[in-house]
Amino acid sequence: MDLRRCRPARLAALMLALTLFAAPAAALDLRQLIRGVEDQYIGLSSHARMRMEVSTENWQRSLTMEAWSVGRDHFLVRILEPPKERGVATLKVVQEVWNYLPKVDRVIKVPPSMMGGAWMGSHITNNDLVKAAHVDEDYDFALLEETDTYWRIEGLPRPEAAVVWGKIVYQVRKADRVPLQVDYFDEKMVKVRDIRFEDVRKVGDRSIPLRMTVQPLDKPRERTLLQYEKIEFDLPLEKDFFSLRNLKSR
Amino acid sequence: MLLTLALRNIWRNKRRSLLTISAMVVSSSLLILALGVFSGMLRDMLASATEQYHGHIVVARQGYQDDREMFANFAPDPDLLQRLGRQPEVVGLSPRLRGFGLVSHGSSTYPAELLGIRPQAERGVTTLAGHLVAGKFLAAEPGDGAVLGRGLAKKLGVAVGDELVFVTQAADGSFGNDLLTVSGICATGDSGHDNSLLRVGLPWLQRVMVLDGRVHELAIAIREPMQAAAVAGQLQRQLPAGMEALDWGQLLPEMREVIASFDVSRMIIVVILYFAAGLGILNTFFMSVLERTGEFGIMMAMGMRPWRVRLLVMLETLAMGLLSLVLGLGLGLAMSLYMAHHGIDLSGSITPVTYAGGTILPRLGAVLEIDNFVIPAALLLAVCLLAGFLPANRAAKLRPVEAIREE
Amino acid sequence: MEHGTWNIDLLQLAWRNLWRNRRRTLITLAAISLSVMLVQAFHNLSFGVYARMIDSGVRAGAGHLAVYRGDYVQSRDEKLAYDPQELVARISQTPGVEAVLPRLYLPGLAQSSRESRGIVLTGVDPAAERGINPFLKNLPPEKMLRDAAGRDAVVGARLLRELKIEEGSKFVVTVQNRDGELVNELFRVRGVVETGIKELDASLILVGRERAASMGGVPGEVHELAVILRRAADEAAVFPAVETLVQGRPELHAVGWEKAMPNLANSIKLDYASQKFIFVVILLIVTIGVVNTLLMSVMERLREFGVILALGATPGRLRRMVLAEALVLGVAAIFIGSLLGSLATWYLVEVGIDLRAFVPETLEFGGVVFEPVLRAAWDVAWMARIAVYVVGLALLASLYPAVKAGRTRPAEAMRHV
């Protein structure tokens, strides 16, 4: 762990987290909990191999991908299968997204007006890639329900947060703090989509669900399923790994 | 016998007859020219709105034209194509596929609309090939050529022969992407299209978008664009369920409004023109008969019946009117033809204008429409007969002595 | 060599001559004056319609003149924003200026919880824009942006439908800031406008300028200063004044509306070119009428001319007499014609022509929605000019008849019928 590479905000968050863990008597910190949920696949750095299955009215896709990340802001993913799309890659650095197209050997930056487009034909938009990681900063959380096995936590967007949702509801397993389901509502509190998490496994010292299903509710027959086949955390990855040069190579 | 007398009368007073005839010739020919120029403007407007992009009628899946949804495509059934092509009104039929995505060259990337076409078929429907400023239109054989607007070419910094990358979401959800070679650059004057439209080969786009054998629309050119709504109705009956034939009025509702308002202002101007021409002709014919009151008096004094005087004048007027109409129509036709072929080029002071989805090139031209000849001819003949009849009638009602005494 | 020069006598004589054939004179007079009336009234109508189009065009668009940095007019390159510093205040103080509207345009993405669309985020000064921009005319005051830094947005009607949101809903706008980073901000739909222009209705988002500028990473900066004048005719005076004000900053320059909105300027020019062509046709027809009348009157008075010549008048006097008749006829015609033209114009100014019977309410012309009631405006200078033309044409038309009259040979003429 190289603290010098952390930005002050992150450092502060880390310090805060350490303080909280140091005080076991403290009440459940919902924000901390959600941050953990949102960052479950990230860690300080990660390397994964996954399969994405997309069903829409118009296509069925099955992709195998390899992904690397460092923190929330650096992310690189490359398609391994099918052969036709092998080598297509996406790089995300902070707020920007590039795609590499091996067939024409070109890197294309996604312009703002195209950020709403589907990423790799899934139910995840380019914007989701860019923004997903800010939930704990944009919402205020409240405990809706507590049972023996899970918490239901409601996230209401802060008045000025740049989020499209009316609220988000998390269902988190108490035992290992693993999410079971996340529901997204519009401003009229109509549920728009949900994400279900399954197949929880122990990876290193953490429990994570290896399967994630995104379901848009206005299109009940559509979904995107993401299955981690392999994931490892806290590798010695540097931020300069996430460069345009690296996007093209390999 | 009366006819001979009438002709002799016309001949006898050559100068007056010439004057009267010349007034009529000039007025009628100018009127015809002006009407032709107006029809020309209307045609240019309509042509620019339809023939640069849409075509007169477009056949597509229901609702496609509203949201351009990629999946609202269809496989053009050869039977259907043949049936549509056989319609007597249809002069051109072009199957097209449309794709939205990013085009990129070097470090610049812009959103663009790609229209996949068969070059030969497209030429029969739109006039884009005529707007090239560099390079060539797409070659007939399928390839990776692209014709793009000048604005887009400038933004991307490409010239003829350069490579472009097109990226889109293909129909199977994958990244559709491939290279294009700029084959031509066009300037239609419509900044919207010039800044975002590329035309590429249909097979190329079908492959990149993974839509083999599919198209989004059939663009159709017809003989009489103003009849498009009726023809679209006929075509509609040939189509399978779920498909629709839209005429330009439905594709470009603004255009219909523009034509309606243009019709109003044209009506005003045409009324003014008829007024001016009619008054001029009325003036000369009226005068030329009026000043002969004395002459008619003498004729009646010599025993000619008043009705024969009237008839004589009507014959004279008719003969002169017909003669001058023939000349006027001829002159009007000649001037309209000149305007149709050469026109008045205004591009020195005006650049092309975008007008309700179409683009008008800055030129005053003319078209020949039968109505622009028949209606003025009939009206002006009626005016000159009236102009002859009124004073003749008056003279015929006078007693010979009174008539002779009039100046 | 000719002592009988132009004088009142000659004009009186011409007047009397004209009245000798009252019917012919009246018909000719009617023909000319009606043509004058038609041309004047129609020109004034177009003048009024164009003026309104320009007015609504410049108010919605780039103003009568605008200040840009570099070639922003053509390239629309967002990087060409600039800090207006004290320009807004100083241009506002220039006489003839009604308002200065600072605006910022950022292309980007609007997202609701269901859809996303490409848009142009337009940052405006709500207070200044309110009274000027015709798109906001039908917007109730409580639906207008409340301040320049808030999160209120006025959204195009089609865009609102496509995003599947409604008044009061929130949505997120993403734009690229100066450093190329994506910036997201929340906005709330305050009001909805339907301009009638399809592309605008599908992409327009008006927000406070300070909010937009901070998103773009260019606080305080603008892309455009649209200068609205009290009267369009003041442009000639205000333009150099504005140019002087921006002189100290070579990257900035003033652009007239004809350059900033070439489409509007050119549609008007094209429309007017076709009209001029029609006017020329009408005037030609009028001229032929005058030639005819005068020539005929000369022909039938050949005998009389013969007598006058025999009595010792010079051919020059005859020529001048015919010219004088044309002059009197022309002046009388333009007098009556202008009177009628003024009446027609007055009607068209007060009542206008209602197109609503023919066309739907929104009508686009050269990118500007134009009003369904056509109203004229007074262009007195042009009316005077056309009057002078007509008198000139009458004189021109009388040249040949005058020459003809001057060539009369007494003996021959008296033998004539």
Image: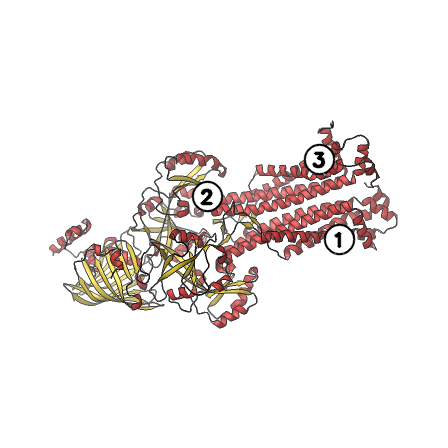
| Chain label for disc 3 | C
Disc assigned to residue C259:
2
| Chain label for disc 1 | B
- Circles 3 and 2, Cβ within 8 Å, touching? The answer is no
Res C356 visible: yes
Residue type highlighted by circle 3: Leu
The correct choice, above or below, for A173 with respect to C107 in the image is: below
From the image, tell me which residue sits under label 1.
B318
From the image, tell me which residue sits under label 3.
C323
Circle nearer the viewer, 3 or 1: 3
Are the residues flagged by discs 3 and 1 from a single subunit?
Answer: no
Residue A20: x %, y % from top left: 14, 54
Q: Secondary structure at mark 2?
A: helix
C-alpha span from label 3 to label 2? 47 Å
Which residue is drawn at the image coordinates 83% and 45% (left, top)? B295
Viewer-side residue, A28 vs B37:
B37
